[in-house]
Amino acid sequence: MQLETSNSNVKTESNQHVQEIQLSSTLINLSSPQSLLSTLQELRQTVKSEGQATFNQWRSHIQRSEFLSSALNLAEYLALRQHDLRSLQAALMPWGLSSLGRIEARVMPNLDAVIATLEVICGSQSAQHLNRPPIEFFFEGDRLLQQHTEELFGQSPPQRRVRIMVTLPTEAATDYEMVREIIQRGATCVRINCAHDTTESWESMIDHTRRAEQETGKSCKVMMDLAGLKIRTGQVLAPLHKKRVFKGDHILLLRCEPELGSEAGEFTTSTLDHFQTCCTVPEILDLLTVDTLVYIDDGKIRTRVVDTQYPAPNGQPGLLLQVMNASPEGVKLRSEKGLNFPNIVLPLSPLTEKDLSDLDFVAIHADIIGYSFVQRPADIELLQQELDKRSQGRLTRSAIVAKIETAIAVSNLPELIIYAAGKQSFGVMIARGDLAVEIGYQRLTEIQEEILWLCEAAHVPVIWATQVLESLVKNGTPSRGEMTDAAMAERAECVMLNKGPFIAEAITILDDVLTRMEAHQLKKTPQLRALHSW
């Protein structure tokens, strides 16, 4: 399978090449159970052979024997989803059969169950006759997902399936009661962002977590999130009388800092025609060409390159960016704001020198390691090699959570799963902030769903992250949209809350929402508990 691709290769309605199944309703009458049976039998054979071929390519990268069946199911799911099955789904419904809409965790058992029932309906036992799969085999995928989730996060709370992860603020290093309340309220995992604080602070946070576990009797895992590659703006120079960037303005993006200095990190001069800033990873600029998109500050400022050799005051040519989108009120261009390049595959290592230094501590103290900026299977192998160097006689590798932040990571997700989960406990975080900027906000929901489906097919737990109940955490009052988002998060195995002054209240509300939704929804399956409102 292709391991490197740009954003343009992520599926869209306009460029998706759907591999049409030659056993679809366009060729035969699917209102006939005999036609349905032969259609499904042919589909099963196609999925089995193509899935096995993909699995064979992956086999050498799988060291954990307990992951073999999950990898095969993932390969079969990918083979199945190469086909447009919508007409087949509609044809199955009137017969009271599974429409294959919840097949992720059990591809072959689901197909076999439908085929076995159709054989009974048709009164035939062909040469391809299949026995109905045993109940335990049918639900084996669900059991494996639960097992892999417990390996990563520990046992779930008694009242709900979905875990809650909370990012610890700096104050957690000195305020034990804060950590205790976070765990008491229902957090089953705490996250330490290695982009902030020191090893001394991290150690204190972990000590507080372990102490709180003992006092509350509640288990809590520690995830340490490596800072990763931070591509940001440097200091900013602004033209005289210009405070904000508007649509149509130009920004000069340089390879090194503007020459004027100020403690505030922002400048004003009468000699500038355009705003100026630099990129903290200057080698990226060599990859950009005219019309390349450059997004600044989580996409608040959206630009495109109009000149790659624009003369700069320091004598070195810079990139001239034209602002395509910005708030009508303008946006203040600031230093230390993120830069995104949606259509560019960045050939950069996801492990910085700081990450390698931090790993000396993280590899020993963390239950889970959060991995930023993962793009290729080689990135997974790099972290595994670095962890092996620091194993210090540990019998098992630390668990890894890959943060899916870019289009290339989405395209390579099956291989990322195989390379990681084939060797150690593994999970996926849908990093919805960066991902939305990279692929476009209008596509976030679609890709988020596809990531959930793919991970369920591999029996890999998913963390639903970024701005969950953000208004509640920061201001004490949630928005209606946030409550709906939190309810939808029940389809993941873990939901992450960010730090804020009302984090304790947010944990309590999220715990209540997830507990209530569990009675109504399990992954993609509606749960039909009795209704009490009527």
Image (cartoon, rainbow, N blue to C red):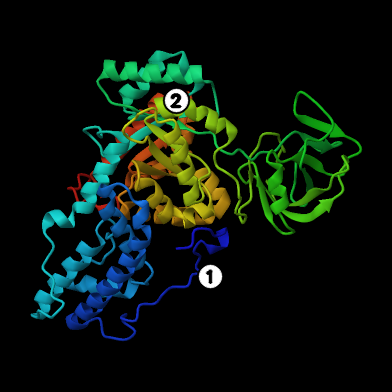
What's the residue type where badge 2 is placed? Phe
N-term-proximal mark, 2 vs 1: 1
Q: Is residue 177 visible?
A: yes
Residue 274 is situated, as x and y percent measured from the top left of the image, at 83, 44
In the picture shown, does residue 19 fall above or below 325?
Answer: below
Residue 150 at x, y = what percent? 27, 38
- Residue at the (12%, 80%) spot, across then down: 126
Looking at the rendered structure, the secondary structure element under dot 2 is loop
Residue under the point 29% across and 41% down: 149
- Nearest to the observer: residue 408 or residue 244: 408
Q: Residue 463 appears in which quarter of the rendering? A: top left
Residue 502: image tag: 2
Query: Whole-Å distance between the Cαs marked 2 and 1?
Result: 44 Å
- Structural crowding at the residue carrying mark 2, measured as other residues with C-alpha within 10 Å and reported as few (<14), some (14–19) or many (≥20): some
- Residue located beneath label 1 in the image: 14
Which residue occupies 38% across, 14% down? 177
Q: Position of residue 259 (x, y in %)?
A: 84, 33
